[in-house]
C-alpha cells in the first residue's frame, strides 16, 4: 500500500485532526489536547522516503508556533520538585522513565575487540552498582566482539544491558543490534557526518529540508531492526559534534542541538518506533542545561513523552569533573528532568559510580511526592511569579562597589565583575605566626611580607569575630588586606564592641531595616544577610538600604532552590541591582561530596544567571578544609558556571575503547605544563570522534589520530599533524606560544624573604 502524498505540514495537520478525532497518531499535538505520542495505523506500511514523513513543523518559519502554540512549561512544576512524566522505554532487564528509578550508567574504557578485558571491566562496573554500560563500536571487528561479550556475560550470570556507541557507521549499527540491548547514535555524524566546518548557505528552508533524504536512507533500516528486536535507542546530540548542515543553518546553539534530535526522532516515529531516549550533552554546563530544558519544553509543546539521559560530556577529572557534572546534571534533576545519568570523568569507569549515584540520591531526596520533608520545605516558600525564560540565557549583573569621596581605602575590589569569592576566616589566623600563611591561603602574592592581590585572590573575607584591638600585629595584618582592596565583612554587633576601620558591617535584613542601615563607628559600607523567609515588602527595602552585597543563605525550613529563585524574582521586578553572594555552609569533610553539593545547590542558580559570587563556610565538628582548598573550590564553581576564569580550562574526554593514548597520564602531563593559563581552554581528546567537533569552543586541541600519534588543533583547524606522543606536550606548549597565549609560571617567593618580612 502506498500513502497519499502530502506536504509535511499538511500531513502533520491531517494527523493532528485524526488525533483529535480519537484516532491514534504519531504526529505532535497542540497544547490544549495534550495527547500522547502513540502510533498511527492509517496504513500497513510506513514511510520510506523523506517526503512521506510527517516532520515536526518548522521552528524558523513559525509553523510550529502557529500550529502548536508558544513554548510554555519545561518541567512538571516550577514550585514543587516533580519528575517529568514520561513513557517507559525498555532496555533489556531495565526500564527508563518517570515510573522507574533513575538509571546509573557508565562507559567502558577497554578496547572492545579485547573481549576478555571488556567483560572483566563490565563485571567490575556491574558489581559496583551500575545499571548499564556503554561500549564503543568502531567497526565490524568490534561488532562481532559484542556478540561474544554478551554471551560471556550471560554465561557468568550478568544480565546488565549494554549500549553500543556508534559514530559514522550505519551498517555496523545494524550488525551490533543483533547483540546489544541499546544503540546510541549521534545525529551529528551517524549519517550527516561531514566535518568540514565550511559554512553552507541555504537560500530557503526547502533547500535545508531537501538534504533529509540521506538521513532517512541511513536511519530507517536501523529503526526497523530495533523495532523488530525491541532494542532501545538513544538519540544523543552533542554540542561539539553538530553536523555541518545543522551548524550552517542553526549555528552552534542549543536550538541546533534540539532540532537535530527532533529530526531523527521524527524518523523513528514515522516507523511507529518509540523505544528511544534523548540526550543533549555539552562540555559547557550552561549550554547543556539550556539544551535539555529547550528539548523538554518542545516535548511538552508537541505532546511527546520520551525519557532523557543526562550528562556533561568531557567533564574532566577530580573535583573539577565532579563539579561540572553536578552543575549540569544536578540543575536539571532539581527540576525533575532526567531519567538516566552518566558522570563522564577522565578516570576508570568504576570511579564514576559514586558521583553518579550520589547525584541520583540527591535528586530523589528532593522529590515532593516521596519525601514529606522536601514537600514541606517547598510549600513553605512564599508565593512568587517565576518569569525565567528558558529559551535564552542572560546573566543578572549585580552592581559593584563605587568609590566615594572621602573613602580611606579602595572599595572597588571588594567584589569582582565576573563573580566574587569570599572566604570565612578565624581571628587567630591573623596572629604574627600565622599571617604570612593566611595571605598565601587567601591567594595573595607577597613581596617583603606585604600581601597583594593576584588573579585568584579572594575578593573579601568574612570574620565572625575580630582580633582584639590590643593585638597590634594581628590588626596590622588585617589592615594590610584592607589596604589592597580585600573587603573585610564583620557582623555589626562585633564592630560596635571593637571597631575595625574600613570594615564592611554585616546585618540581617531585618536589623538593617529596623535601624535604617546605620553603620557602626569606622565601618565603610553595609552588607545585609537574607534567609528567604522575609516578606516581599521587607526584601524591597534593600533598594533603599543600598548595601554593597547581599549574603543569601536560605533558612533550613524552606527549599533553597525555590527560596533563592523567589529572591531573584523580587529583585528583578523591583529593579534591585545589589550583588548577591550565595552563602553555602557545609558539615562535610569529603571533598568529592562538597563538589557535588556545591555544584548542585549553588551551580544550579549560577547557570540560570542568578548570583554574583559564593562563600563556602565549613561548620560542625568535621576536620576542617584549608582556606586554600575552599578558595580554589569556589573559583572552580565560578569557572564551571562560565563566570570567572582563574586557571586553564580543560575539556577532557572520559576515555573509551577508541582512545589512542593513555588519557589519564597525558591529561596529568598537560595539566602540569599548561594549568597556569587563565582564559585558555585546552581540549584533550583520545580519538578523532571526540576531536574537532567535541572540542567545542576550545582554543587548542590535543587529539589522538593514529596509535602513538597526535594532531594539534587551533580552534577547529588542524595545525600540526602526526606528532609522536613523546613530543606532543612540548609541541602543544610551542603552539600556545605561537598564538601569544603563553606566559611563564611565576616563581614562588623565596621562603627566606617571607621570613625576613615576618
Image (cartoon, rainbow, N blue to C red):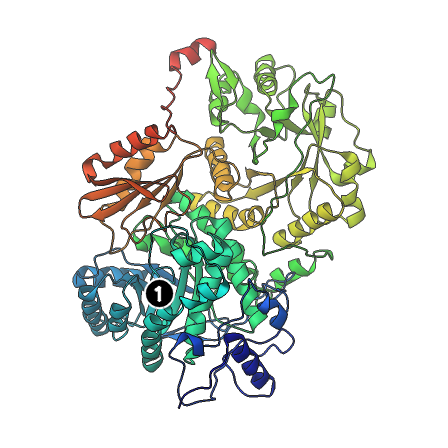
Image location (x, y in percent) of residue 177: 28, 73
Image location (x, y in percent) of residue 251: 47, 53
**Residue 45 visible, this orientation:** yes
In this rendering, the answer to whether 646 lies above or below 361 is above
Q: Is residue 312 left or right of residue 16?
A: left
Answer with the quarter of the image where residue 217 lies: bottom left
Image location (x, y in percent) of residue 543: 77, 38
Quadrant showing the N terminus? bottom left
Helix, strand or loop status at disc 1: strand
Q: Which residue appears farthest toward the top when viewing the image?
A: 756
The residue positioned 35% from the left and 65% from the top of the image is 185
In this rendering, the answer to whether 227 lies above or below 653 is below
In the depicted view, which residue is nearer to us: 16 or 682?
16
Q: Is residue 275 left or right of residue 56?
A: left
Answer with the quarter of the image where residue 270 lies: bottom left
Q: Is residue 566 left or right of residue 716?
A: right
Q: Say which residue label 1 marks.
A: 185
Amino acid at each position: 500500500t502506498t500513502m497519499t502524498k502530502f506536504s509535511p505540514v499538511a500531513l502533520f495537520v491531517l494527523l493532528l485532526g485524526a488525533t483529535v478525532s480519537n484516532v491514534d497518531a504519531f504526529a505532535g499535538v497542540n497544547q490544549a489536547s495534550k495527547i500522547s505520542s502513540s502510533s498511527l495505523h492509517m496504513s500497513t506500511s510506513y514511510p520510506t522516503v523523506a517526503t512521506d514523513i510527517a516532520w515536526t513543523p518548522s521552528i524558523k518559519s513559525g509553523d510550529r508556533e502557529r500550529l502548536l502554540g508558544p513554548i510554555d512549561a519545561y518541567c512538571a512544576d516550577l514550585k514543587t520538585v516533580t519528575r517529568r512524566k514520561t513513557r517507559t522505554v525498555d532496555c533489556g532487564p531495565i526500564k527508563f522513565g518517570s515510573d522507574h528509578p533513575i538509571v546509573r550508567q557508565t562507559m567502558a574504557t577497554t578496547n572492545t575487540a579485547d573481549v576478555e578485558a571488556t567483560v572483566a571491566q563490565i563485571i567490575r562496573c556491574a558489581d559496583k552498582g551500575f545499571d548499564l554500560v556503554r561500549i564503543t563500536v568502531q567497526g565490524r571487528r568490534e561488532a562481532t566482539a559484542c556478540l561474544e561479550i554478551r554471551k560471556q556475560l550471560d554465561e557468568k550470570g550478568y544480565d546488565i544491558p549494554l549500549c553500543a556507541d556508534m559514530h559514522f557507521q550505519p551498517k555496523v549499527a545494524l550488525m551490533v543490534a543483533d547483540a546489544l540491548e541499546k544503540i546510541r547514535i549521534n545525529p551529528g555524524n551517524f549519517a550527516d557526518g561531514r566535518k568540514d566546518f565550511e559554512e553552507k548557505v541555504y537560500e530557503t528552508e526547502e533547500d535545508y529540508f531537501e538534504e533529509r533524504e540521506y538521513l532517512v536512507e541511513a536511519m530507517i533500516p536501523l529503526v526497523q531492526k530495533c523495532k523488530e528486536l525491541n532494542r532501545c535507542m538513544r538519540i544523543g546530540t552533542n554540542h561539539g559534534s553538530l553536523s555541518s548542515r545543522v551548524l550552517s543553518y542553526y549555528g552552534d546553539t542549543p536550538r541546533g542541538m534540539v532540532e537535530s534530535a527532533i529530526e531523527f526522532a521524527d524518523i523513528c516515529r514515522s516507523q511507529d518506533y518509540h523505544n528511544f531516549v534523548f540526550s543533549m550533552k555539552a562540555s559547557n554546563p550552561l549550554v547543556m542545561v539550556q539544551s535539555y530544558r529547550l528539548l523538554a519544553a518542545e516535548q511538552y509543546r508537541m505532546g511527546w513523552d520520551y525519557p532523557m539521559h543526562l550528562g556533561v560530556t568531557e567533564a574532566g577529572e577530580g573535583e573539577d569533573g565532579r563539579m561540572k557534572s553536578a552543575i549540569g546534571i544536578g540543575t536539571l534533576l532539581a527540576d525533575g528532568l532526567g531519567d538516566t545519568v552518566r558522570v563522564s570523568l577522565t578516570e576508570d569507569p568504576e570511579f564514576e559510580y559514586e558521583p553518579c549515584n550520589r547525584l541520583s540520591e540527591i535528586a530523589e531526596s528532593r522529590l515532593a511526592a516521596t519525601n514529606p520533608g522536601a514537600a514541606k520545605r517547598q510549600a513553605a516558600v512564599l508565593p512568587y511569579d517565576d518569569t525565567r525564560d528558558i529559551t535564552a540565557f542572560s546573566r543578572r549583573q549585580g552592581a559593584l562597589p563605587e568609590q566615594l569621596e572621602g573613602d580611606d581605602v579602595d572599595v572597588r575590589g571588594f567584589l569582582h565583575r565576573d563573580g566574587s569569592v569570599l572566604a570565612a576566616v578565624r581571628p587567630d589566623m591573623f596572629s604574627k605566626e600565622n599571617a604570612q600563611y593566611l595571605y598565601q591561603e587567601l591567594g595573595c602574592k607577597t613581596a617583603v611580607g606585604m600581601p597583594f592581590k593576584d588573579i585568584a585572590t579572594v575578593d573579601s573575607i568574612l570574620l565572625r569575630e575580630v582580633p582584639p584591638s590590643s593585638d597590634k600585629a594581628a590588626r596590622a595584618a588585617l589592615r594590610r588586606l584592607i589596604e589592597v582592596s580585600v573587603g573585610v565583612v564583620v557582623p555589626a554587633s562585633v564592630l560596635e564592641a571593637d571597631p575595625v576601620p574600613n570594615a564592611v558591617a554585616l546585618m540581617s535584613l531585618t536589623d538593617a531595616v529596623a535601624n535604617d542601615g546605620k553603620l557602626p563607628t569606622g565601618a565603610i559600607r553595609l552588607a545585609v544577610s537574607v534567609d528567604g523567609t522575609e516578606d516581599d515588602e521587607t526584601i524591597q527595602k534593600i533598594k533603599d538600604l543600598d548595601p554593597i552585597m547581599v549574603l543569601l543563605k536560605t533558612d533550613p525550613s524552606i527549599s533553597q532552590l525555590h527560596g533563592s529563585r523567589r529572591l531573584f524574582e523580587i529583585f528583578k521586578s523591583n529593579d534591585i541591582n545589589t550583588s548577591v553572594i550565595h552563602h553555602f555552609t557545609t558539615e562535610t569533610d569529603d571533598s568529592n561530596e562538597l563538589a557535588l553539593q556545591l555544584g548542585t545547590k549553588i551551580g544550579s542558580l549560577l547557570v540560570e544567571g542568578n548570583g554574583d559570587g559564593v562563600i563556602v563556610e565549613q561548620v560542625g565538628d568535621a576536620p576542617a578544609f584549608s582556606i586554600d582548598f575552599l578558595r580554589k573550590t569556589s573559583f572552580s564553581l565560578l569557572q564551571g558556571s562560565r563566570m570567572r576564569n582563574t586557571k586553564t580550562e580543560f575539556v577532557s574526554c572520559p576515555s573509551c575503547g577508541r582512545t589512542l593514548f593513555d588519557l589519564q597520564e597525558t591529561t596529568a602531563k598537560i595539566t602540569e605544563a599548561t594549568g597556569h593559563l587563565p582564559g585558555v581552554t585546552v581540549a584533550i581528546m583520545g580519538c578523532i570522534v571526540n576531536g574537532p567537533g567535541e572540542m567545542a569552543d576550545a582554543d587548542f586541541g590535543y587529539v589522538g589520530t593514529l596509535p602513538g600519534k597526535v594532531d594539534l588543533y587551533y580552534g577547529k583547524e588542524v595545525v600540526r599533524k602526526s606528532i609522536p606522543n613523546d613530543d606532543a606536550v612540548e609541541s602543544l606548549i610551542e603552539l600556545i606560544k605561537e598564538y601569544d597565549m603563553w606566559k611563564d609560571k611565576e616563581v614562588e617567593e623565596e621562603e627566606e624573604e617571607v621570613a625576613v618580612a615576618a
